[in-house]
Amino acid sequence: GREYYYNSQLNITQWEPPVPAPAPGQVPGRNISPIPPQNYPPYGGHARGPMPRGYPGMGQQQGTRACFLGSLPDDVTFNQIAQLANPYGAIDSIKLHADRNNAFVNFVDVHGAQNMYNASQMNPPRLGSSIVRVGWAKSAPIRADVAMAAANGATRTLHLNLKEVPDDVTEEEIRPLVAPFCNDTFDSIQVNNEKRFAFVNLVDLLAAIKTHSHFQSNPMTIHNCPVKVGFGNDRNVRPQKKPNPDLTTTTGESRAVFIGSLPPDTSYAQVCQLGIPYGIIDAANVNSEKGSAFINFVENDAAARIYEAHQANPLKIGEAELKIGWAKSNPLKDDVRNAVDMGANRMLSIKGLTREVTEQALKDALLPIQNIYGVLGRVVLVEMSDDELAAAQEAQKSENVETLVPVDDNADENGNQAEDAENKDEENSIGPMKALIDLGTLTSAMKIKRKIEERDHPIVLDGTKIQPDFATPAEMEQAAAVPQ
């Protein structure tokens, strides 16, 4: 059977992946049949492709309601885990193994787990300096009584009405009243003496249900005064601020959000990074003078996710707390929708580069195009797999390139160059490297890819013709795994 073991390369504990033993003459890890392709949802821009191995049930447990979180910092808390998971759906339970630096989050339904997994593949979450690795985990069906209670409004957050208590109440006074029902394990306790209420966030929905039930028949008292106990919103609730009319320009049916209070030096890439964990970004616009930006997502649900995440725990850039509200949006263009359905996303993959190619050289080669159509974000140079290299070499043989013209300083404003007859008979060399370029938005990636393909003369870098494709889900995960 599979064993749970420590992976020294990833610095995590994990389930042993179910890899079949190689037959005689096979090279382990290369001649073994890959995991069968899985169906990726439209959210995240994932096309069909193999799932990665290495975490409990990853690539095989899609459809469960549980996620595995690995590579957690030593001092991680239940509250930090809850804040990572809250934006994606109602949480049933959290199990933290601090000695193993991992945790399991069970959502009430599969959609919460799917949302968290998808977001993590686009942009892995962080706790401090640690990149948290998110995978699938096995889960038992949710208890029928718990599912029924959740459907009727039960959450793992208890609301305490303190209006009958004349004196200020402390967390230390509340904790022992609830501890017997939750094994003294809490996500957090938040007390607002000014408005006379408190929220007790537990790590287990069943414990919250039992606590609530007990205090319905045995009323809670603090300072000999009655305290009403009900269920609160499962979002690590903060005291609500008055709505800003400038930010609520439309309803949650929009796919666009407004972002305000940006620091003066906020970059386009930073704005894109805010939205990437929540869904595919169609387009983004930054107004540095006004300290604001707009993000248009492909899906309405993505805009709702970032809005809800911000309401639970306000997003920041540096130390600046941002303002996020709804914005008006036009319907998504048909060509963009069709491109997403075909696997288009914000990242381009350029294969066959030589080892001598640098990130700066690649950016310089694409400068005439990016100046017009978008800003190149992060560029990751990685080595191609043997299968990718073989496929690139085979494509080169069938293409029979006639003319390759190196990029020079005489390119016009559109990046077109004069043909160099001396290079007429050169062959397109295939190197072992590939570049993964994050454009931040789908629109920028589509425009730059199309412009490169429509050029009269190809862009050539160190003998390699630049031919971008949209990155596969596996390549997006590969780029995310490279430290920034």
Image (cartoon, rainbow, N blue to C red):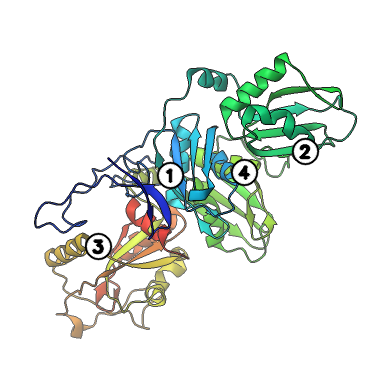
Whichever of callouts 1 and 4 sits on the residue coming sooner in the sequence is: 4
Whichever of callouts 2 and 1 sits on the residue coming sooner in the sequence is: 1
Q: Please, which residue is most extreme toward the right here?
A: 166
What residue type is disc 2 on?
Glu
**Eye-nearest disc, 1 or 4:** 4
Q: Secondary structure at mark 4?
A: helix
Label 2 Cα crowd, 10 Å radius (few <14 / some 14-19 / many 20+):
few
What residue type is disc 1 on?
Asn
Q: Dot 4 corresponds to which residue?
A: 79
Instruction: Name the residue located 53 percent from the left edge and 33 percent from the top edge.
Output: 93
Q: Is residue 385 above or below residue 165?
A: below
Label 4 Cα crowd, 10 Å radius (few <14 / some 14-19 / many 20+):
some
Residue 217 position by quadrant: top right
Position of residue 288 in the picture relative to residue 57 (left or right): right
Instruction: Name the residue located 47 percent from the left edge and 29 percent from the top edge.
Output: 109
What residue type is disc 3 on?
Ser
Q: Dot 3 corresponds to which residue?
A: 385
